[in-house]
Amino acid sequence: MSENDIPHADVVLQPHGPMLIRGAATVQDEDGVVHPVERPVVAVCRCGKSSRLPWCDSTHKLIPRG
Amino acid sequence: MPEPRGPVSEWVVARLASYRPSALPRPPDTPSTLDDEAIALWTLHELSYQGFEDATELAESDPDVSRTRFRLEATLESRLRERWVRVAPTPAEVPEALEQLAAQDAGPSLADHVRRHADADQVLEMLRQRSIYQLKEADPTTWVVPRLPTRAKAALMELQFDEYGNGNPNRLHAHLFARGLDAVGLCADYGAYVDGALPETLELNNALSMFGLNRRLRGAAMGHLAAFEMSSSIPARKIAQGLDRLGLAGPMSAYYDEHVEADAVHEITAAHAICGTLAEDEPDQAAEIMFGAFTCLDLEGRMAGALLDSWRSAA
Ligand code: FES
Ligand SMILES: [Fe+2]
Ligand SMILES: [Fe+2]
């Protein structure tokens, strides 16, 4: 058995959804503002439609998948 | 303990209060009203959470008490299974099937009503009903941890750690809700509003406790979790907006705000890392996961419908 026999990534790009980041202390947004992270895994918006950028607020689920 | 609502809950309350059970009659074993059976089962399940000051702890292991609990659980489970519109995805299809189920849910929405129309009294009533679960938020799900295979177990612990505040008691979700209740002038004591709980509220709580307490129902418990998380983030934002509209912002809004961001993560973890891997590792759990998810959405819809109906007929 290798040391990590179960695939497990710290950053996951969710299809049609956010980027999940595990173990980050801070995230810098597009304007250079640094946001503290207070949870073990955080979802960063990739659709640009969230009302709480840089975080995902699940608004991506309302976007039709053309 | 709660006020009894019929012969079954009367027996339960009398039995739990009694140190001399031999003086009591046998528990009634004929069907009673939904309301009576729901409050009886809720009371029995609470023995596994915080218990009651006026109940003897010894009742937890009493055969008559257990038999009554299992009989009421069997009735509840068969009712839930009858309502279930069965789908049986392959294990690999489970996350997608959960997403579809949640996306197609057309049940009545309390969040929409709270966002735009509800008055303060209605919001307070919703919070009282919610308090029955939210003051033990995440607890029934924790019982499932030891019953899961490796990948689902690690993922569930990561999610639950967030529900429990990541080690900081000030951020524990049930505690955030208690602070919110306090701030809007409601009582934050555990179980304070159970006598006003609708049968729909109790049924929803009882299903969750039953899924958590029985290893056999672990798939349903995880499906319930996924559906709950998947129908939380967007509604939480609407409820926070409604609270702001009514001038009830503050700690209660902070509770819902926290869920906008937390559950955007949790819903993905629950559908993929928990339910997806559980179904891969234990393929016979795929249908059970869907049963739990359906039950969550169905019972939430029934509770929302009951509240909305009561407000409509009062108007
Ligand atoms: S990715 Fe979720 S709101 Fe943008
Ligand atoms: Fe939570
Ligand atoms: Fe959550």
Image: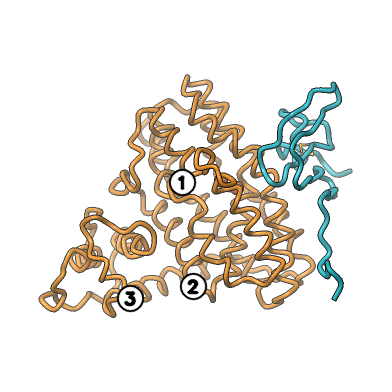
Q: Name the secondary structure under disc 3.
A: helix
The residue located at (53%, 65%) in the rendering is B83
Q: Chain of mark 2?
A: B
Instruction: Choose the circle earlier in sequence order: 3 or 1.
Output: 3
Residue at the extreme front of the image, as rendered: A3
Chain letter for orange, please: B
Badge 1 is on which residue? B134
Q: Is B102 above or below relative to B250?
A: below
Q: Circle 1: is it few (<14), some (14-19), or many (20+) Cα within 10 Å?
A: many
Q: Name the secondary structure under disc 1.
A: helix
Q: Circle 3: is it few (<14), some (14-19), or many (20+) Cα within 10 Å?
A: some
Q: What percent of the width, then of the height, locates residue B203? A: 42, 58
Tell me how many marks there are: 3
Instruction: Choose the circle earlier in sequence order: 3 or 2.
Output: 3
Q: Circle 2: is it few (<14), some (14-19), or many (20+) Cα within 10 Å?
A: few
Q: Amino acid at mark 1?
A: Gln
Q: Name the foreground residue: B72 vs A30.
A: A30
Badge 2 is on which residue? B214
Identify the image quadrant of residue B76.
Answer: bottom left
Identify the image quadrant of residue B291.
Answer: bottom right
Q: Is residue A61 left or right of residue B112?
A: right
